[in-house]
Image (cartoon, helix red, strand yellow):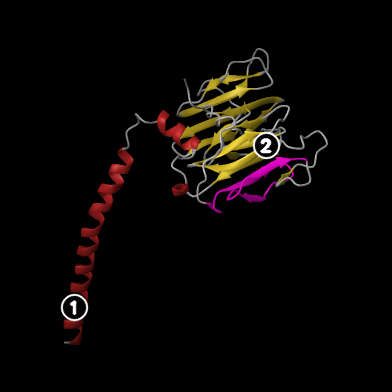
């Protein structure tokens, strides 16, 4: 099973596996509708998957491409769970389904770490960060730690708390649950880089120092697994160049010192 996929949420099309490389979406000549195109064909957008992550590039002159409701004119880096709109077609970047948190089981009691935060990237709490050194509730109720002021939102939607090397998301009886990395869930285990969406447009990202959790950012792991067989000649070459650079610098310094000595010796005469 592919780790990364592009899911067409508003059209009856199969998921598009996203391995390392370029993946184009363009307009079919016969119907004028969006479809997957080859590397040599014109594309409205292209998804580039490499060791750094997933990048969206928009063809020159194209308009109306949005990521999570924000218009993109040229380039954007994507997270798992991001939604892309092109010509009225909705596509979502999805990843490996995260395992569910044990239902009803008490969470372990790790040491509080204020560096682990839930950062808003869309919706009412865009730009705000909530530390997770203590459990946080999400809901419409006034006492909620992360309050969603929407009459249609559940009073007690979900609860987030630190687990052993992870963040546990537990549903508190909401109607539709939550969306983690593009997949609908009730309970889930979250790692740094995971994206959580409540009520379709309230987006948050789990952030933590690399050493705070045992796991790595999911999207980085996915790309690394997809690219595991790729050789790395560039890195080896750069190390070799660095190894040669030091002797040449020493030789250049010695030659410069010798030249200055000759100038001083003959110039004084």
Numbered badge on residue 158? 2
Is 100 located above or below residue 116 in the figure?
Answer: above
Quadrant of the image containing the C terminus? bottom left
In the image, residue 136 lies in the stretch drawn in magenta: yes
**In whole angstroms, how far apart are the C-alphas of marks 1 and 2?**
76 Å
Total residue callouts = 2
Residue 238, numbered label: none
Q: Earlier in the sequence, mark 1 or mark 2?
A: 2
Q: Kindly indicate whether the residue at mark 2 contacts the one at mark 1 (C-beta within 8 angstroms).
A: no
* Secondary structure of residue under mark 2: strand
Residue closest to the far bottom: 269
Q: Which residues are magenta?
A: 112-140
Residue 203 in the image: x percent, y percent?
Answer: 66, 39
Q: Is residue 164 magenta?
A: no
Local crowd size for mark 2, using a 10 Å CA cut-off: few (<14), some (14–19), many (≥20): many
Q: Which residue is at 47% across, 44% downward?
A: 213
Displayed quadrant of residue 57: top right
Residue, disc 1: 261
Q: Is residue 178 visible?
A: yes
Q: Position of residue 261 (x, y in %)?
A: 18, 78
Residue occupying the point 51% across, 32% down:
48
Mark 1 neighbour density, 10 Å: few (under 14) some (14–19) many (20 or more): few
| Residue projecting furthest to the top | 30
Estimate the x, y position of residue 117 in percent, counting from the top left: 59, 48
**Label 1 element class:** helix
Question: In this view of the protein, which residue sits in the foreground, 252 or 187?
Answer: 187
Q: Residue at 50% across / 51% down in the picture?
A: 111
Q: Is residue 211 above or below residue 150?
A: below
Q: In the shown orientation, is residue 241 left or right of residue 111?
A: left
């Amino acid at each position: 099973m592919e780790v990364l996929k592009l899911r067409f949420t508003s059209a009856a099309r199969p998921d598009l596996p996203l391995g390392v490389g370029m993946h184009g979406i363009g307009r079919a000549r016969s119907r004028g509708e969006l479809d997957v195109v080859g590397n040599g064909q014109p594309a409205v957008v292209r998804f580039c998957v490499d060791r750094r992550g997933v990048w969206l590039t928009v063809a020159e002159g194209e308009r109306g491409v949005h990521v999570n409701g924000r218009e993109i004119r040229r380039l954007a880096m994507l997270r798992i769970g991001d939604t892309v709109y092109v010509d009225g077609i909705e596509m979502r970047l999805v990843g490996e389904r995260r395992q569910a948190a044990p239902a009803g089981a008490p969470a372990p009691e790790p040491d509080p770490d204020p560096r682990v935060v839930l950062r808003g990237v869309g919706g009412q709490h865009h730009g705000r960060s909530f530390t997770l050194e203590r459990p946080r509730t999400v809901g419409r109720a006034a006492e909620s730690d992360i309050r969603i002021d929407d009459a249609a939102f559940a009073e007690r939607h979900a609860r987030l708390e630190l687990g052993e090397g992870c963040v546990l998301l537990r549903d508190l009886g909401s109607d539709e649950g939550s969306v983690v990395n593009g997949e609908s869930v009730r309970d889930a285990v979250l790692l740094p880089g995971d994206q959580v969406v409540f009520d379709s447009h309230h987006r948050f990202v789990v952030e933590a120092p690399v050493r705070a959790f045992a796991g790595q950012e999911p999207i980085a792991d996915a790309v690394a697994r997809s690219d595991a067989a790729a050789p790395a000649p560039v890195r080896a070459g750069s190390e070799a160049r660095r190894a040669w650079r030091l002797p040449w610098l020493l030789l250049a310094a010695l030659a410069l010192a010798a030249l200055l000595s000759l100038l001083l010796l003959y110039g004084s005469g």
